[in-house]
Amino acid sequence: MKKILTLVWILMCTGTVFGQQTIDYILKAKAYTETGKPELAISLLTGAIAVTKESRLFTERAKANIVKGDYSGAISDYNEANKITPSSGEYGLSRIYALKGDAATALYHLEMNLNSSFRKSEKEIMLDPAFDPVENSSEWRQFWKKEWYSITERSISEIEYYISAGKIDESKVVLSELKKSYQSNDDILYAEALINLSSGKYAEVIKDISGLTALNPENENFLRILAKAQSGASNPAGASVTYTQILSLDIADADLLILRANCYRKTGETDKALTDIGKYLEIYPENRAAVSLAGKLEAESGDNLKALEYFSKNLKLHPNDPECYIDRANSYFVSKSWAWAIKDYSMSLDLKPGNSDIWLNKGIALLNSGRVDDACHDFRKSMSLGNRRASDYISRNCIK
């Protein structure tokens, strides 16, 4: 508990990640809960609540209490959230009572949620496993006889489903029917942008969504689509600006830091990228992708020793992941530490033998070590797996 209170004090004194200290608490608490440490999340949030009472702190602590199995504590937290921000805890209360098998109370709170600004989409509710214990009840069936969502909302939900399933043509049919019935509006433009994004029509998405974001600069869904389209259109500078806009909305999503860091990496803004990755690793210190990206950024900045530290850390955390061996091998390769590179490339190939690029790289490292016969074996293996670049090495070094 002392360590948790110290962390709260540090967060209070060192400023904020996104402008509000609440986000720092929530991000760290989410990480604790997601990694099976709800007690740490509860302790952190309890300390934060002692400093500042905000509804999001209570709803986040409620989620941790649910994972811990303390439904009473979670109910109390959601009720406290409702007192601070009306209806902010209703969906959470609905989930808890559903988990308890109390369909009537669960649906009472779900109706409260659907009639509020915090209303969840039909798709999110239907896919939420918390409602499994009551979905076969007569109360649940009766509840959904009422049309809680508009035709436009249902159509967009259907389009989202088809896109997630890779059924783009079906999503276009739904959009076409929607356009026949309604004049163009923000929702229809949003649905069309989703389809265009999935079809790789990035310029059209940017054109339509830019207009929507100009009128709705705080709409998270619009901004996320715009950022994806900008990235797809090879405009990482524009995407980084858009991700900055999203982060300014105090959204508790640490993955936004990874997305922006990748944009900064492409624009050559390595220092900014390292700052974002550093913040992410403070929250998720063992995330494989983030540790790998940190290592690659350090290597690109010229600090190969620091890069090796990150890659070695990843291998300790994920010893059966071939990509972790490849990352470190590539770093050794760049520094011409051929023996170490060969060792790590070999380990990666033991785990994933079908990687033609790694057979080629290992062959090059062997060649530079004077082991020509072994190198030629690897070049031929690479070529047999479809790597045409290997033929040049074979013709220059392996044909006598």
Image: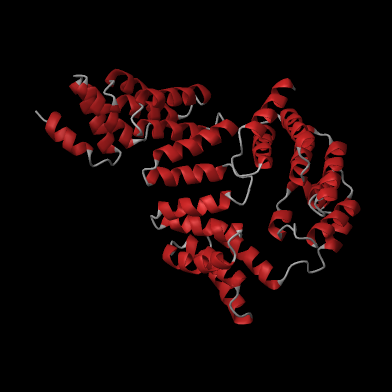
Colouring style: secondary structure
Give above or below for 13 relative to 106: above
- Residue at 20% across, 24% down: 367
Choose top left, top right, bottom left or bottom right for residue 213. bottom right
Nearest the viewer among 136 and 192 is: 192
**Which residue corresponds to the image point at 78% horizontal and 66% vertical from the top-left?**
148
Q: Residue furthest front?
A: 13
Along the viewing direction, whichever of 215 and 87 lies nearer the viewer: 215
- Residue 150: horizontal and vertical position, in percent? 72, 71
Q: Eyeballing the image, is 204 above or below 228?
A: below
- Percent position (x, y) of residue 97? 86, 46
State the residue lying farthest toward the left: 400
- Quadrant of res 347: top left
Q: Quadrant of the N terminus?
A: top right
Q: Position of residue 280 (x, y in %)?
A: 55, 36
Judge from the rendering whether residue 323 lies leftward or rightward of residue 6; answer left or right: left
Total numbered badges shown on the rendered structure:
0
Q: Residue at x 60, y 75 (%)?
A: 185
Please tell me which residue lies in front, 264 or 141.
264
Horizontally, residue 322 falls left or right of residue 5, namely left
Q: Is residue 115 visible?
A: yes
Look at the picture and state if 209 lies above or below 88. Answer: below
Considering depth in this image, is 127 or 44 the residue closer to the camera?
44
Image coordinates for residue 222, horizontal then vertical, percent: 57, 61
Q: In the rendered image, which quarter contains the C terminus?
A: top left
Which quadrant of the structure image shows residue 119?
bottom right
Q: Residue at x 56, y 29 (%)?
A: 285
Vertical relation: 305 (above or below) 111: above
On the question of residue 284 being in view, the answer is no
